[in-house]
Amino acid sequence: MAALMPFISPHTKTAIVLFNLGGPDTPEAVQPFLYNLFNDPAIIGLPWPFRGMLASFISRRRAPIAQGIYEELGGKSPIFENTQLQATALQSSLSGHGKVEVFIAMRYWHPRAEDVVKEVKNYNPDHVILLPLYPQFSTTTTGSSLAEWKQLAAAEGLNVPTSAVCCYATQPDYIKAQAQLLRTYYKEAEGFGTPRILFSAHGLPEKIIRKGDPYQSQIEASTEAIMQALGIAGADYVNCYQSRVGPMKWIGPSTTDELERAGKDGRPVVLVPISFVSEHSETLVELDIEYAELAYEHGINHYYRVPTVSTHAHFIAALSDMCLRATEEKTTSDTGWRMCGKEWKRCGCR
């Protein structure tokens, strides 16, 4: 007999909190956004007040560069609006499953978790589901958001059963969404030779991976699952990493190096933003403008950037499925938090 699909009781109120990075909504917000980012102990591990001093220095120094990036986007990041569309689509997909309200909590800009915790408490749910918009777990993204929420929820007295999704790197519908988007651009690129697929993810310093962060291994697992779903024998593909900052050694290879190699090999390029699920500065500016120009400089005349999964039907189905299954992971506030994504033994939330 087939297993029954999880179901949210029509007599319960469920709050779903989508976690995302956030982004400045005005040019003036760029520096404080950067300060919040670099003041996160998951990003810079120095103790206070040294972390705050360094965050202040870095944010002042990087603000003019970042403002130039956001000028390409009309002076602000589109990430909040994109996340709102995902929240609306998710809530619609869960209609008929009791009273469900989807909230958005951004880590480094508004709406901040400290405000959203209050909104969720006022909503008075029977169950809270924490759902990061990061398919692959990292202590610097999902881990940071979950830790902040747990601390704020305790301080606010939000004592209701809570479940958290830690990762979904190989969730079937997420993989289907990625593979369907990739296939369209791969077929177009095939008209100009054998394409090289670059699965480009946000980079991390090597020292974070050495401490046991599973992010890189989960990126690779996502890539292998997508390629299996794509089903193209002998396809040429590689994992690479973008957005490096600072002097320390980062995981590689870098996306810029892989673009240069593809140019030397005379390959058309299909680039997949494997770690991003919504459009923002790192896709719309770094990939679409800066890397497109770099590809042309390296002789790549056919450069295709696959869109993020955004509100793709299969991706929303993935989010919906994880919320429904999280109802089976419900815990009480006095027994701690249980995390989903059990296939990962080192996902940092054990």
Image: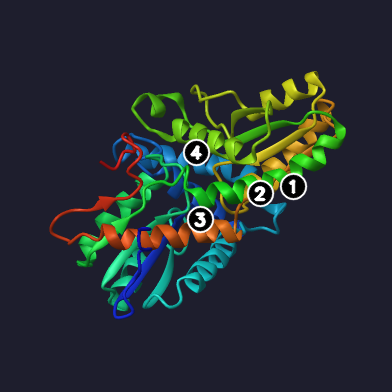
As drawn, the label of residue 184 is 1
Residue receiving disc 4? 58
Report the Cα–Cα distance between label 3 and label 4: 18 Å
Report the Cα–Cα distance between label 3 and label 2: 27 Å
Name which residue type carries label 3: Gly
Question: Where is residue 190 shown, x and y percent of the image?
Answer: 81, 35
Q: Quadrant of residue 289?
A: top right
- Left or right: where does residue 183 sit relative to residue 104? right
- Left or right: where does residue 49 sit relative to residue 197? left
Name which residue type carries label 2: Gln
Dot in front, 2 or 4 = 2
Upstream in the sequence, badge 2 or badge 4?
4
Answer whether residue 25 is visible to the viewer in this image: no
Camera-nearest residue between 119 and 231: 231
Upstream in the sequence, badge 1 or badge 3?
3
- Left or right: where does residue 208 sit relative to residue 84? left
Q: Residues within 10 Å of mark 2 (few under 14, many from 20)?
A: some
Question: Where is residue 191 shown, x and y percent of the image?
Answer: 86, 36
Q: Residues within 10 Å of mark 1 (few under 14, many from 20)?
A: few
Q: Is there CB contact under 8 Å for labels 3 and 4? A: no
Dot in front, 4 or 1 = 1
Upstream in the sequence, badge 3 or badge 4?
3
